[in-house]
Amino acid sequence: MRADLLQRAAARQQARAEAGLLRRLRSVTATTAPWIVLDGRRLLSFASNDYLGLAGHAQVREALCSAAARWGVGATAAHLLGGHRAPHAELEAALAAWTGRERALLFATGYMANLGVLDALLQSGDVCVQDKLNHASLLDGARLCGAELRRYPHGDVDAAARQLAACPHAAALLASDGVFSMDGDVAPLARLAALAQQQNATLLIDDAHGLGVRGAQGAGSVAQAGLDARQVPILMATLGKALGTQGAFVAGDAVLIDALTQFARAHVYSTAPPPALAAATLAALRLAQQGEHLRARLQARIAQLRSGAAALGLHLLPSDTPIQPLWLGSAVTAQDWSSALEARGFHVPAIRPPTVAQGQARLRIALSAAHGESDVERLLDALGALRQHHAQPAPDAGA
């Protein structure tokens, strides 16, 4: 008897609910960074990827409104069918220059960008070697394109070398996040670049959480590592994190961008992002380039949180980025801490399986230049109160 797909989906949802892992959408009804109004309550948010506080910046909003008055609110077509407008071209040129690449290509989302790159470049018989903690879009892209996916333990370059060496005759792509979205640590980029050159593999770095935050003028993790376009020929980054808008891009040489324009289905068959959004992103890019004071403010908040957490005996995973995970182990414990913080006026969501592995649940504290010293101090006070009533479990060997 043929299975009913909706019944099967309902059963999977029920199993997730029984395991305490069910997710639900909650609507934010107002926001003035770093504050949000959620379910009618005003909360101090530590959940935003708006690392430089640019999402609500006056210049970014003005650029959006001005461009919308000229171009309307939608591109009305795919890039190749007339949807590619002057603001898109201007933004692509600025992104390429910022990241030290010959050209750049816009995508609707980071997920679509990674799927587009892997779909365009890989095929059956090729191999894609990836860090086990890479973003889901990189892993899904490798599975969907038909290449053999091989995953190495997090940050283990020697293991990555063995994976590549095991497939000496296959065309190979080596892919890694720059900054890992759930752990907040930075990939060993220089060693990965050296390995890719040694093994004649093409290196792709997803710098969604590094662009704007790291490197000179905020050019990202790859720039901070001192790597150029020859060493990292494929660079992907998103526009919805430090730049505070929406979308993504891939940057590289003309051969890469021409190939993606022809063969990346996620680009070819998607309506172009609104040109007004491209104009707003260009304004945010210029602010980020000149935003050393914002990055300094952000680093001060990171240091403050880590110092305060250590004084309280709280275990934060090693990270010098805005992503500061507080390891708690079980999904139930993480949800309990998140709910207790919300009752005290803070929005710090629990990160549970399947986003992280079983036994690796945590609070993902995301810091922003929009946070003041007093905001972080208030959070530390709340965490200290929780620590007195709910002991933080000792991290296991995998944390």
Image (tube, rainbow, N blue to C red):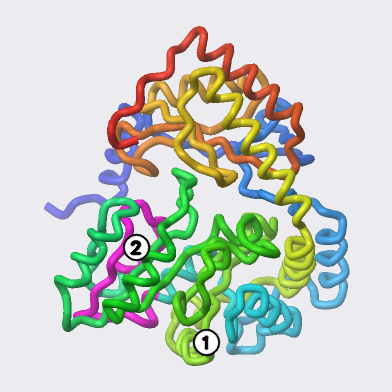
Is residue 15 something one can see in this rendering? no
Dividing the picture into quarters, in which one does residue 292 lie?
Answer: bottom right
Coordinates of residue 16 in the picture (x, y in percent): 33, 34
Query: Which residue is depicted at the point 62% across and 76% down?
Result: 272
The answer to if 370 sits in the magenta stretch is: no
- Residue on which the image places disc 1: 253
Q: CA distance from mark 1 to mark 2?
A: 25 Å
Amino acid type of disc 1? Asp
- Which numbered disc flags the more N-terminal residue, 1 or 2? 2
Looking at the rendered image, the quarter that the C terminus falls into is top left
* Residue bearing mark 2: 140
Residue 302 lies left or right of residue 135; in this view the side is: right
**Residue 325, position in %: x, y?**
49, 36
| SS at mark 2 in the image | helix
Do the residues under discs 1 and 2 have CB atoms within 8 angstroms?
A: no
Q: Which residues are magenta?
A: 118-143
Residue 139 % position (x, y): 34, 61
